[in-house]
Image (tube, grey):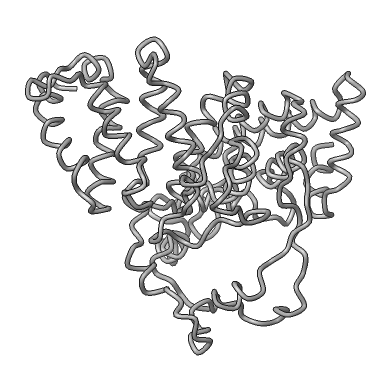
Amino acid sequence: MPTGFIATVLPKLTPHLLQSDDPPLLRSATDTVHHIVQHDSATLFNYTDVTTNKSGLETVLIIIDRLLGPDVEDAAAAKVGDLAGAVVEHAGHSQLGPYLIPLLQAVAFRLARATKATLTQSLILVFARLAISNAREIVDFLASLTIPASALEPSTTADMPLPTLSSTSAATDVNGLTHLLPKWLDASATFVGYDAIRTNVSALTTLYSLNDSRIASIPCRGDLIPNPATAGRIVTRSRAKQTPDSYTTVNAAAKIVRVLVDELAGPGDAAAANAAGRGLAGDDGDDDEDEDLAADDGDDGGEWEDDNTFLDLGLGATKADLMSFGNGGGLFPGANMGMAGQQRSDDGTQQFLEEWFRAQATQEDQGQRAAFMEILGGLGEKEMQKLRMLG
């Protein structure tokens, strides 16, 4: 960063980050600090605020602590995971010292009650990046963590909760690994951005390769069980509450494999386009007004709210379609673009997944290979069709 930039900017940003409740302001300010950490962490961590006598690292940790706290809504804290992950990456255990474990605990507690997809992804990626090189340590940390009941209360202004196997009573403390790993795996389907998806895929393959009995014993959502009561009908939020979806149960090891299969591109399948579309559309968390407009007052007269035929001009995929109309490929025709202006799949991630599945199916350990093949035996025809393409 330019000389004197941090000393000029950080004292101006810090009061807003510690006092403001405005979501767009907090997201932008958090992004700014994240950018500073990414590009000039050495200067930032060694900087001392003359008014508070705190180092730059201490100041950033105080900011993170405030954004992870229960008083900041999900939309406002949407970028805190990116900032926390950057601090862990650039400061490391050597500089964070005794602050590292409390920081990861705070991230885990906030993840436990997060319901907004953007915030959930950013917090999960903190653990995903660490798991790539320290998978055993991350599993041990989460397994030893007790999440208090008070940390499980979701934000009242958040999106509809991500689906889970079963609801957790707010009166009961829960184990970190048992509670957070299923949430991590369910949320993987909503990840946006090539880097995030690639990081998540790498982390999940590493976790699976641990062959940890603790992971294999955790129940997760499997396949959707059709509900005759809602067949052929528009499912509004009020109706969804009355007749919630039901799912089969699989263990977390099997769920990891299912998530990875979903990321594979296959014949006649939209996985690659969906992954690219998720990367194109993104989610900047700035949807507070949309949430207010979409709020369900419980009156069935408002069932039009979930009609899938509604054209939402706020969706990134819709905008991509409109921008590509008439020019055959969006703003930059032919530049890694597919049909309807969508980016093509991430070839590097696809190649990594293909090699990983082949390696698992041909590994020398007969017990592990048999366990892997048993998981594959529980997949549907659509998923198996993808795997057959691997040869």
Q: Position of residue 378 (x, y in %)?
A: 86, 48
Q: Nearer the viewer, residue 332 or 28?
A: 28
Q: Is residue 310 above or below residue 197?
A: below
Image coords of residue 1 (percent x, y): 19, 22
Q: Residue at x 51, y 51 (%)?
A: 278
| Residue positioned 38% across, 51% down in the render | 74
Asked if residue 152 lies left or right of residue 79, the reply is right
- Image quarter of residue 231: bottom right
At 64% from the left and 20% from the top, the residue drawn is 136
- Residue found farthest to the front: 171
- Image coordinates of residue 77 in percent, x first then y, are 34, 46
Is 97 left or right of 138, judged from the image as shown?
A: left
Residue 76 lies, with reference to residue 99, above or below; the image says: below
Q: On the rendered structure, is 347 left or right of 150?
A: right
- Considering every residue shown, the one lying at the far bottom of the view is 301
- Position of 380 with respect to 68 (left or right) is right
Where is residue 20 shown, x and y percent of the image?
A: 19, 48
Q: Residue furthest top?
A: 94
Height in image: 252 above or below 342? above
> Looking at the rendering, in which quadrant would you find the C terminus?
top right
Q: Nearer the viewer, residue 301 or 342?
A: 301
